Image: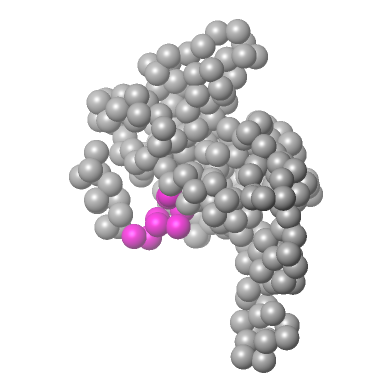
Amino acid sequence: MSDNPSISEKIRRRYENLYSGTFYERFIEGKWVVAHGVVYPETSNAEMFCKKPDLQFEKYFVSCDYGTVNPASFGLWGKYNDEFYRLNEYYYDSRKYGLQRTDEEHYKALCSLVGDLEIETITVDPSAASFITLIKRYGKYKVVPAKNNVVDGIRQVSTALKNKKIHICQNCKDSIREFGLYRWEDSVSKDVPVKENDHAMDDIRYFVTTLMERDEDDTFFVLSANRT
C-alpha cells in the first residue's frame, strides 16, 4: 500500500489502524501469508483487559453462544460514549460439571446475568433455534439471530479491539482464558480457527457483528422486534 501514489498519508494511516496480526500483514503489508498462531494477538498484553468501570452506561446488550453438550457463553455489554464494555458473563461447561443444563436453566441464568437492567437486544447463535424460541415465548427481551460469518467476524472483532471500541473487563475470566487459547488451524488452503476454546470468542463475535455495528440504526431494532 505504501507504493500506491493515489493513497494519501492520512488515508494510509487510517487503514493501518484498522488491522492487526494476519490481517495487517495481508491488507497493509501486502504479504501472502497463511493465518497462523493466536487469532487475537492484540490480547496477549494483559493491559488489554480493564477493571470493571463505575460508569452510568447508556444501553445494555447481551450476546449468547448457546450449548448443551458444548459450553454456553453469554456476555453482558454496556455502552458508554460509543465504546462497549463486556461487564459480566455466564459460562457453563457441562463436561466440566458433569451435568447438562436445559433451555429453561440457561434462560434462568440469562435472567440472573441481566438482573434488573433494561436490555436493548439479545443476539443468539443462529443455530440455537430452541433457545431463541424460548426467549421469544417469554416476551421479556428482544432477540435476534446472530450473523455467523466466522472469518469476517474475526476481522471485525480484531479491529474493534485494536481501536478500543470494545473492552473486556478483568472479571470475565473465561473470555480472557479463551483469548489466550484461540488459534488458527494449520491449513494452507483456507482460514479456519480451531474449534476449541471458542465459545466466549463466538459470543463476542456475535456481539460485534450483529449488535455493535448497528447500534445507531434504530430501524434495525424496530425491524428485529417486528420479526420476533
Left or right of 144 in this view: 185: right
Q: Magenta segment, principal secondary structure?
A: helix
Can residue 172 be seen at all in this image of the molecule?
no
Q: Residue furthest top?
A: 98
- Closer to the camera in the image, 198 or 177: 198
- Is 146 inside the magenta-drawn segment? no
Give the residue displayed 31% in from the left and 39% down from the top: 142
- Quadrant assignment for the C terminus: top left
Query: How far from the left and from the top, in percent, is residue 146?
Result: 42, 43
164, above or below 169, in the image = below
Residue drawn at (55%, 39%) of the image:
202
x 60%, y 39%: residue: 201
Residue 67: image location, x then y, percent = 50, 24
The magenta stretch is 210-217
Indicate the quadrant containing the N terminus: top left, top right, bottom left or bottom right. bottom right
Residue 61: image quadrant is: top left
Look at the image and name its color scheme: one colour
Is residue 216 on the magenta stretch?
Answer: yes
Q: Is residue 182 left or right of residue 101?
A: right
Residue at the image point whose x is 63% and y is 55% from the top: 158
Q: Residue furthest left?
A: 226
Residue 206 visible at all: yes
* Residue farthest toward the bottom in the current orientation of the protein: 5
Q: Position of residue 96 (x, y in %)?
A: 65, 14
Give the x, y percent position of residue 125: 44, 35
The vertical placement of 28 against 79, above or below, is below
Q: How many marks?
A: 0
* 129 left or right of 24 in image: left
